[in-house]
Image (cartoon, rainbow, N blue to C red):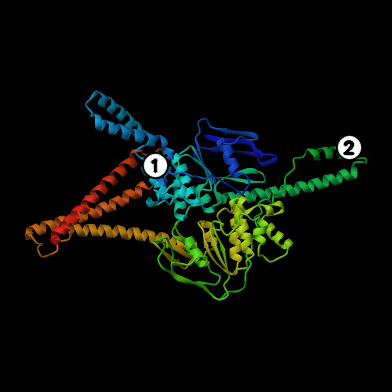
Amino acid sequence: MTLVRLQDAGKQYGDRWIIRDVSFHVAQGERWGIVGRNGRGKTTLLRLITGEEEPTEGEVWRHPGLRFTHMRQDRGEQSSATVAEAALEPFADLVAMEKRLHAELEQLSEIGHDSEQGVRLLASYDRHVEEFRRRGGYEMHARAEATLEGLGFAPAEWSKTIRALSGGELGRVRLVQTLLAQPDVLLLDEPTNHLDLRSTEWLEQYLKGYPGTVMVVSHDRVFLERLCDHVLHLEEGTAFAYTGGFESFLEQREARRELQRKQYEQQQAHIARTEDFIRRNLAGQKTKQAKSRRTLLERMDRVGAVSDEGRAMALRFGEAGRSGGTVLRVDGVTCAIGERRLFAPFTAEVSRQERIAVIGPNGCGKSTLMRALAAESAPCAGAVIAGTGVVRAYYRQDFTHLDAAKTVWQEVSDGAKGTMPELRGHLGRFLFSGDDIEARVGELSGGEQARVALAKITLQRANLLLLDEPTNHLDLESREVLEEAIAGYQGTVILISHDRAFLSGTATRVWSWADGRFDDYPGGFDDWQEWAARRQAEAASTAAAVAAKQAVAAASAPAQTARPAAGLSKNEQRRREAELQRVEARIAWIETRIAELEAALGDPALYAPGADPSRPKALAAERDALSAELGEAYAAWERLGEELAGV
């Protein structure tokens, strides 16, 4: 069933057309990736689809009653609500209903069930409970918590207020709200921008199982390939629709361009021959034929040349000169925020021409470590020692090294060597020309600021590049150019990124954070992924085996011989020892079962429309009951231990 159809749609602002002649349709259950250079109208297209804006020309048809949710990438937020409260905003009606149920329950406890008023109130309460259950009220908290955890919010962060969040954290809260709204058509604008690797993979799985239709603007090549079955590419002022995944799109686009190139060349040759005939015969005996051909030529539908608007910036890193073989020595470095230590002491040696990827979840200390490596800040302990002849250049993901008040020209040319024409040519290679260079840095988009930062860093002629999230805000073509520039660079690179295709194409070594420490893996990103998956599976298997072994041992082991505790007979002591073993076995089983229930409750498929709505409630109820029992079991274990110890 077709949900959305665009026919010759276009949007104009002032005298500038953003997109024109856009025609495609979206069917139920499809996954669309929307790609194209920054500024080509992707966000405008999403607004046309939702009806937030009307087309200047053409038609946008939507199936009646269709529900959209559009996650924007640029919305600010100032709220005193907590993260947990914000996650429940899509359930505003259910939250209000829950409060009403609590109020009715409190009234019932005061009035009593037997009175006439109590009978009426109880009947009302029962109706509201049934409606609350039918609409998924008993699952909303579990769904919100699972989505928060899936997108990288630990339970300890749920009490933070929205106004205290960073831009990246706020983006993740908006994504949580968008997913929980469960619309017919889910529209996501750069959803992976602020996600770490684990959260990106969680989102992939969630969207694969999503029962509605998904349309996502993204520059993440792996994400697009794993998720999408259709691609819409915006270029040449319009949009081209392709069926298939991202790799298939690349092949089809190249084939379309090659066909267009041949048709253009053939038509141009035909036009040249026809014009030559017209010139030679317009005033001669064949004037009638010449005029006829001129008329046909004027009416001909012209094939356009293959556009070069897809050209990306021309990026090449200058180099200060050859450094020593040892570029950096990281000696027992640890960093902290306040009193919270981010990672254990880390020791490593960086050699010339290595490409090291620093990866880990958001908030684990990657950027803090990078600042220490760049000598921007001192570590809490340990030292970073630079080798002979090392010249560092540091790219910050928040662009705080750029002066927002300066123009592009002032920012890039400040302290740079070269003549004005040379510097203008340099800026042109980063797609800044004409009046662009007079724009204030603070007024630029994220992608434009990224190009300013890269234009600036390439003039520094460093032999050690420290790049913190350099692919953020860059479009697909620019990411590929950056990847090629790093491959051709003769110096050393240490980088942070969550773009898996970029990491696969650049990293020769990986520093990965896990369990409060950085591991140094001596291989590329793809090899590290396989190694990490094996290690995770082995750890899970070992933990399960240990828990099972402890439970069996506790249940079957004979009581240890011990001297009678003070005040206990030998028979009484043996009875208590046997009881203690039973309690220990029960504790081991309960903890294992709670871990299984938590994993099940964190599965996005559990909350998808069409799934059994009673299942999450049943799992949560079992978990809560076992948690209460676990507390009682530990109390009994402590009491028995004290009795046996004679305390």
Vertical relation: 121 (above or below) 333? above
Residue at 63% x, 39% y is: 22
Counting from the top left corner in percent of width and height, residue 130 is at: 33, 31
Residue 259 numbered tag:
none
Mark 1 surroundings: few (<14), some (14-19) or many (≥20) residues within 10 A? many
Q: Nearer the viewer, residue 297 or 358?
A: 358
| Residue pointed to by mark 2 | 288
Residue at 34% x, 42% y is: 616
Q: Nearer the viewer, residue 637 or 589?
A: 637
Q: Nearer the viewer, mark 2 or mark 1?
A: 1
The amino acid at mark 1 is Tyr
Q: Give whichever of discs 2 and 1 has the lower sequence position.
A: 2
Indicate the quadrant containing the C terminus: top left, top right, bottom left or bottom right: bottom left
- Residues at circles 2 and 1 in contact by the CB criterion of under 8 Å: no
Counting from the top left corner in percent of width and height, residue 25 is at: 57, 37
- Measured in 3D between alpha carbons, the distance from the residue under mark 2 to the one under mark 1, in whole angstroms, is 75 Å
The amino acid at mark 2 is Lys
Q: Could you say which quadrant of the image residue 608 lies in?
A: top left
- Specify the farthest residue to the right: 284
Counting from the top left corner in percent of width and height, residue 257 is at: 67, 49
Q: Secondary structure under badge 1?
A: helix
Counting from the top left corner in percent of width and height, residue 412 is at: 65, 60
Vertical relation: 48 (above or below) 384? above
Say if residue 531 shows up in the picture.
no
| Residue pointed to by mark 1 | 607
